[in-house]
DNA sequence: GAATCGTGGTT
DNA sequence: TAACCAAGATT
C-alpha cells in the first residue's frame, strides 16, 4: 500500500481532524473514569502500574481486571518485586484471567527490566516494543500514558470509534492500516495519553458496540458515520469461523494424605494452550471421545454421570469425568495436592470447573 | 497472513 | 440462549 492509499480514508473523515482531540479531551476532563491504575489529574503515572494494567486489560474487561490488579499490586508493588517472584507463584496468581502467555511474558519482561534497564521501563515506543509481551498496542499505550510520548494507540475501542468517525467501509481486519492512518490524523501532539484513554472511555461508555449513545457523544458533530445515520453499521467485520467441538477426559486421581485426601495435579507444557499452568491430568483433546487414553495410573476408573463443557476461543471442549484411587505407582509426573486447599493451586477455569463438578458429585 | 491463545459479561 | 465481544501478542 502506498502513502496515497493509506491516507485515503481520512479524506472522507471529519472536516477538521484537528478539532476532534480538543472536543474529546474536554469531555474526558469531565467524564473520565477513576480507575486503580490511572493517575489522577496532577499525579505522575506509575509506569509499572500502567504496564501491568495494559497487559491485564488485553482482551479482558475492566470489571474483571480491577480486583485482580489491586491484589497483584499489593503482592508485587514494583518491577523489582515482580522480577524476584517465583514463576509458579506468578502463574498461579494469573489463574482465571486467561491468555496465560501474558503472565509468562510479564515475568520475563520484569526480569529484563531489572537486569538490563536499571529497574525502569524504557520510555520510547520503539524500545518498549522489544520487551516480551509488548505488541504494537501495548508499546504505544505505555509510551503515551506512562511517559507522555505522542503515540498512535489503537485498540478495539479506537477501531470502533475511528471506523465510525471516518465511516470506514473496509471490513476488519483488512481495515487496520486505514484505521491506524486515520487515528494518526486525530492524535494530538500533547496529552496523547489522555487522548488514548479518552478514546477508550468513549468506546466503553458512549460509542458502544450496540446502540451507541450518539446524543451524548462529544464527537457527534465530527462523525461521518453519524451523519450517514447508522453509525453502528461500522466497523464491518469478516464473518468468523464456527467453533468445532473437541472431547477429552479428566482424571481425578486421589490418595489418602496425612491431612486428608489429595488429588494428582500436573503441570502443562510451557507452550501451547494453558501453557505452564497447573492442571488436572487429561488425555488428548480430539473430535472423538478418547476414553481412558493417557490415564495417569492403572486403577479402577469410574465414570461420573456428568460432563463439563468449556468454551475456548477457537473450540468447545467437552470433558468426561472419571475418578480413581491410587494404590501403586503412577505413570505421570505430578504433585499430590490437598483437596481441601485446591482453590490455592491456581487452576485455570476449565479445571476449576471440572474439580467443582467432581467434588459436588462425590459429596452428593 | 492466518491460527492460536481464555474467560466472563452482555444481549 | 447462542452469539458476540473485550485496553492483543505471537508464530
Image: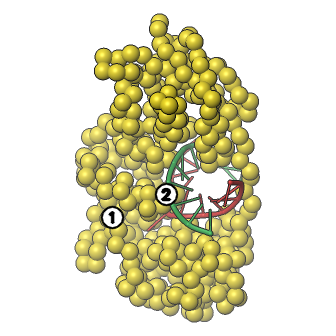
Chain colours: A yellow, B green, C red
Looking at the image, tell me whether mark 1 or mark 2 is earlier in sequence order. Answer: 1
Question: Is A214 drawn above or below residue A70 in the view shown?
Answer: below
Image quarter of residue A182: bottom right
The N terminus of chain A lies in which quarter of the figure? Answer: bottom right
- Percent of width and height locating residue A342: 39, 33
SS type, badge 2: loop
x, y percentage for residue A253?
Answer: 49, 20
> Circle 1 — which element?
loop
Which x, y percent locates residue A228? 70, 88
Closest to the observer: A204 or A137?
A204
Q: Nearer the viewer, residue A258 or A147?
A: A258
**Chain ID of residue with mark 2:** A
The Cα atoms of the two marked residues, 1 and 2, are separated by: 15 Å
Give the answer, above or below, for where A222 lies relative to A306: below
Query: Mark 1 belongs to which subunit?
Result: A
Residue at x 45% of width, y 46% of height: A96
Amino acid at each position: 500500500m502506498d502513502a496515497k492509499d493509506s491516507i485515503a480514508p481520512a479524506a472522507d473523515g471529519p472536516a477538521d481532524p484537528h478539532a476532534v482531540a480538543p472536543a474529546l479531551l474536554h469531555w474526558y476532563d469531565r467524564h473520565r473514569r477513576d480507575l486503580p491504575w490511572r493517575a489522577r489529574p496532577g499525579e505522575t503515572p506509575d509506569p509499572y502500574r500502567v504496564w501491568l494494567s495494559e497487559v491485564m486489560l488485553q482482551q479482558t474487561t475492566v470489571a474483571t481486571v480491577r480486583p485482580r490488579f489491586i491484589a497483584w499490586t499489593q503482592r508485587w508493588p514494583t518491577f523489582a518485586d515482580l522480577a524476584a517472584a517465583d514463576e509458579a507463584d506468578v502463574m498461579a496468581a494469573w489463574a482465571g484471567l486467561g491468555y496465560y502467555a501474558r503472565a509468562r511474558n510479564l515475568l520475563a519482561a520484569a526480569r529484563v527490566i531489572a537486569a538490563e534497564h536499571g529497574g525502569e521501563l524504557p520510555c520510547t515506543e520503539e524500545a518498549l516494543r522489544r520487551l516480551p509481551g509488548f505488541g504494537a498496542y501495548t508499546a504505544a499505550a505505555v509510551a503515551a500514558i506512562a511517559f507522555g510520548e505522542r503515540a498512535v494507540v489503537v485498540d478495539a475501542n479506537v477501531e470502533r470509534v475511528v471506523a465510525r468517525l471516518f465511516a470506514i467501509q473496509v471490513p476488519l481486519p483488512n481495515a487496520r492500516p486505514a484505521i491506524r492512518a486515520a487515528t494518526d490524523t486525530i492524535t494530538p501532539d500533547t496529552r496523547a495519553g489522555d487522548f488514548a484513554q479518552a478514546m477508550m472511555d468513549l468506546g466503553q461508555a458512549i460509542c458502544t458496540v450496540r446502540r451507541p449513545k450518539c446524543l451524548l457523544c462529544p464527537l457527534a458533530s465530527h462523525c461521518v458515520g453519524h451523519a450517514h445515520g447508522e453509525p453502528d453499521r461500522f466497523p464491518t467485520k469478516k464473518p468468523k469461523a464456527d467453533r468445532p467441538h473437541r472431547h477429552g477426559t479428566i482424571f481425578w486421581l486421589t490418595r489418602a494424605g496425612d491431612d486428608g485426601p489429595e488429588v494428582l495435579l500436573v503441570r502443562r507444557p510451557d507452550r501451547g494452550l494453558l501453557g505452564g499452568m497447573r492442571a488436572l491430568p487429561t488425555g488428548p483433546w480430539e473430535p472423538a471421545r478418547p476414553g481412558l487414553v493417557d490415564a495417569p495410573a492403572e486403577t479402577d476408573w469410574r465414570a461420573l454421570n456428568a460432563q463439563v463443557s468449556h468454551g475456548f476461543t477457537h473450540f468447545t471442549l467437552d470433558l468426561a469425568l472419571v475418578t480413581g484411587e491410587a494404590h501403586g505407582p503412577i505413570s505421570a509426573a505430578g504433585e499430590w495436592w490437598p483437596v481441601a486447599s485446591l482453590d490455592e493451586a491456581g487452576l485455570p477455569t476449565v479445571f476449576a470447573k471440572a474439580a467443582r463438578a467432581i467434588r459436588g458429585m462425590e459429596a452428593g
